[in-house]
Amino acid sequence: MIIKQLSVFLENKSGRLHEVSTILGKAGINMSAFSVADTSEFGILRLIVSDHELALKVLREQNFSVNLTDVVCLNCPNQPGALARALQILAENEVAIEYLYAFSVDDSANVVIKPDQLKKCIDVLTLHSMELVRASDLYRI
Amino acid sequence: MIWNEKIECAGRQEMRSIQSARLKEIVERIYYAVPSYRKKMQEIGLTPQDIQGVDDLKKLPFTTKLDLRDNYPFGLFTVPMSEIVRLHASSGTTGKPTVVGYTRKDIQMWAECVTRALCMAGVHHHDIVQIAYGYGLFTGGLGLHYGTENLGASVIPISGGNTSKQIQLMEDFGSSVLCCTPSYALNIAEVMKEQGLDPLKLKLRVGIFGAEPWTEAMRKEIETKLGIKAIDIYGLSEIVGPGVSCECENQCGMHINEDHFLPEIIDPETLEPVAEGEIGELVFTTISKEGIPLIRYRTRDLTRLIYEPCACGRTLVRMVKCKGRSDDMLIIRGVNVFPSQIETVLLQMSEVEPHYLLIIEREGTLDTVTLMVEVQEQFFSDEVRKLQELRMKITKQLESVLGISVNVKLVEPKTIERTAGKAQRVIDKRKLNEI
């Protein structure tokens, strides 16, 4: 249930995002999900890719600061109120969310969540019959 | 007006005999009172009897900022603390400040030197002197303050900062003299312009500027913008503070108060004295100080001396504007900064590797400092909050150690250039070298 997310440190200057995507493209790595957090000074690119070990290697070779971060991915129906229910469960169980990003495919939506307590997050969501995406499935999207 | 004509216009021989007598006395006092300096003398088989006058000066071992650090805080004082009436401090090379102590007599001597400097600059007892140097551990504010009072002029002890208030008091009180760093003077001029105030309508006529390097171009700019005469004053806290030397109205080199601070110029490599008039490192022996007299203290400032009497009538030896430094010390907004201090701060923080680049720029009139730190994998976090916390932590640490605010910028790894030899850690874009 644990998904490996790539986090890449980027300075705020033009062309950096392009460079990352070019490096990954050349290595034949596909990106399933993608989000950028930005401040006035720097940005953090968060990615879920088809082969995170390879991605880590090629990006490090190009001197990027890259980390692997454990996240979970929730799959919920692509309809009003579905995410709210999941978030309510987390809130009631005092699992805080550091950040999240989502993408929807047809009838379902995938929500990548970085909780403050990973295990508890997985446990409470599973307990409430929430569907979590398996890593192998997500990497293939 | 010449404040102390007897000394300031003394013949060379007369000055030398004063210096010789005082040097002899100070060497003897330090030898018996300061174990670390006595040891230095003993190591080369030197006794106080070997020093009979200025000609013997070159036999004596040097004193450096390192000696002040090693004897922190009061190890080089030659009097008991009960006789010290004031302490000042400036930044040392690594974290620990450089501490200096003054006896009552030292404070009087310093005031006398500053009064002479003010008179050199053309200040009279009927002037109103606005002191916009910082008051505190830094010697700038209080140094000028005591000298001005000693002269009998009126002091406005406003200290640094709060530019609108500076301008308001300048207008309302009719300040005729401004004392501050040259970059702050330009900043004041700029704010005046923004406020639509014509500086030429103010009573201001003289500025006494120092504590940081400045160029002839800056002098012209200040003089034009503020409609004043801009005078260069020199000093360092280890020697006494401002007033070690100062320009007269002819602006042709700073007259050294050499009856108190005996100057030499040495080659910073060989440590041998250079030929008269040649450029080298300025070295001072404080021949009348009681609290913390220093023998052959290496200032690291590069300059040369002019022994010809000046058109103003003074015979005090002159030093030309400093041409740079023989070490890597930077003067930023009047504050001494050593790159080693930054390294120490970064090394103390486990999250950071000491790969950094310090960029100093002059934006408008004020120096800005940007520190680029590489984000290494071990402290890179996927959370913005944590990176910002790290940035704040570095910023605060640096501010408390350096005493100036630094804009910390996190950059990608390997973006700071690696060089084969000594890494370039500092880029000074202020263009101060066209002096």
Image (cartoon, grey):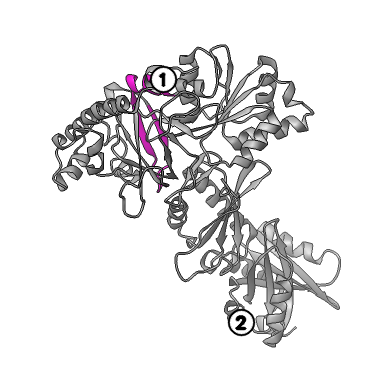
Question: Is residue A136 rendered magenta in the image?
Answer: no
Asked whether, in this view, residue B146 is left or right of residue A52, the answer is left
Percent from the top left, x then y, of residue B197?
77, 26
Instruction: Look at 63% across and 40% down and name the residue there.
Output: B218
| Kind of residue at disc 2 | Val
Q: Which residue is mark 2?
A: A58
Q: Is residue B60 above or below residue B386?
A: above
Percent from the top left, x then y, of residue B155?
55, 17
Discs 1, 2 touching: Cβ within 8 Å = no
Q: Is residue A119 above or below residue B65?
A: below
Percent from the top left, x then y, of residue B242?
46, 30
The residues bearing labels 1 and 2 have C-alpha atoms spaced at a distance of 69 Å
| Kind of residue at disc 1 | Glu
Q: Quadrant of residue A123?
A: bottom right
- The local crowd at label 2, few if under 14, some if 14 to 19, many if 20 or more residues have their Cα within 10 Å, is some
> What stretch of residues is rendered in magenta?
B87-113
Q: Quadrant of residue B314?
A: top left
Asked whether, in this view, residue B63 is left or right of residue B415, the answer is left
Res. B32 visible in picture: yes
Instruction: Look at 70% across and 32% down and name the residue there.
Output: B225
The secondary element bearing badge 1 is classed as helix
Query: Callout 1: residue from which chain?
Result: B
Q: Which residue is mark 1?
A: B112
Observer-side mark, 1 or 2, equals 1
Can you say which quadrant of the picture contains the C terminus of chain B? Answer: top right
Percent from the top left, x then y, of residue B276?
37, 43
